[in-house]
Amino acid sequence: SAVISQKPSRDICQRGTSLTIQCQVDSQVTMMFWYRQQPGQSLTLIATANQGSEATYESGFVIDKFPISRPNLTFSTLTVSNMSPEDSSIYLCSVDVGLNQPQHFGDGTRLSIL
Amino acid sequence: GENVEQHPSTLSVQEGDSAVIKCTYSDSASNYFPWYKQELGKGPQLIIDIRSNVGEKKDQRIAVTLNKTAKHFSLHITETQPEDSAVYFCAAQEAGANNLFFGTGTRLTVIP
C-alpha cells in the first residue's frame, strides 16, 4: 500500500486565520480524498481532489472554506480558511490506487482553533 | 445516500475472548465493505475488507461476514490481545463510487 505523509501533524491556530495542510504520497495514485474527523466522531468526506481540475465537494462543504489543490498524482493540499473553533478537528488525507482498490489514510492533522 | 450504523459504541472484553462488532447499511447498491482500526494519534488503518460477491473472509484472528439480504456485516476478532484495543470503523461504498460512508465507530478495550 502507499505511504502517505501529512504535514503538519498538529497545529494550534487563531480564529480568523487560515492553514494549509499538505498530503504527499510515495507513489502515483488515482484518487486523493480529504476527510474531517471531529473529536470523538466518525469520518466525513470533505472532497475528492482531482488532478488537473477543480475538487469535487460533498454536501455541506464549499470551496471558499476548504480550497483544495492537486497539482500532480502524488501531492494535494487542503486549506482551512477563516478558521473558527468549530473547525477544530482531525483532517485526514486518503488515497486509492485504482478502481475497486481500498482507501489508505495518512495519520492526519490535528487542528485546534483558539 | 448511504447510511451506516455501527454497534456497540464501546466494547470491553477479557484478553483471549472474542469481540464482535456489527454494522448495517441502507443502500442495496453498496458492494464494498472495509473495516479500519484507528489507534490513538494515528489515521485509520485498513484491517480487512469484503466485497458483495463473498459471504465471509478471514485473515488470521480477524474475520468479516456479510449478509446482503439483511444488509449487515460484522467484524469478528478472536483470541483478543491488548494491542487490539483501538477504535474500529466499518464503512460501505457504492458500486462505481469513490465515497466511503463510515459507521460511528466502536471503542474496543481488551483487558489483560
Image (tube, coloured by chain):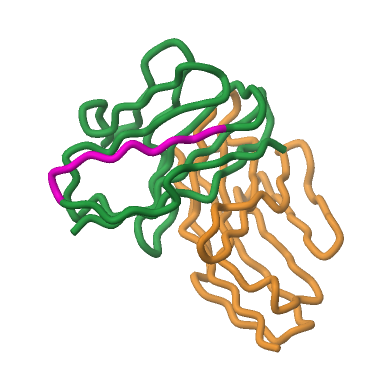
Report the number of discs: 0
Q: Residue at x 66, y 81 (%)?
A: B110
x and y percent of residue A40 in the render? 40, 64
Task: Examine the rendered structure and indicate whether residue B97 appears above or below residue B31.
Answer: above
Q: Quadrant of residue A30?
A: top right
Dominant SS type (magenta): strand
Q: Is residue A101 visible?
A: yes
In the image, taking residue B61 as reference, residue B21 lies left or right, namely left
For residue A23: magenta?
yes
Comparing A89 with B80, the one in front is A89
Residue nearest the viewer, comparing A48 with B4: A48
Q: Which chain is green?
A: A
Give above or below for B35 relative to B39: above
Farthest residue, direction left: A16
Residue B29 visible in the snapshot: no
| Residue B59 image point, x, y percent | 84, 55
**Range shown magenta:** A15-24
Left or right of A88, for residue B32: right
The residue at the far top in this view is: A52
Q: Is residue A109 left or right of residue B67?
A: left
Chain letter for orange, please. Answer: B
Which residue does the image show at 39% across and 54% down from the upper left? A10
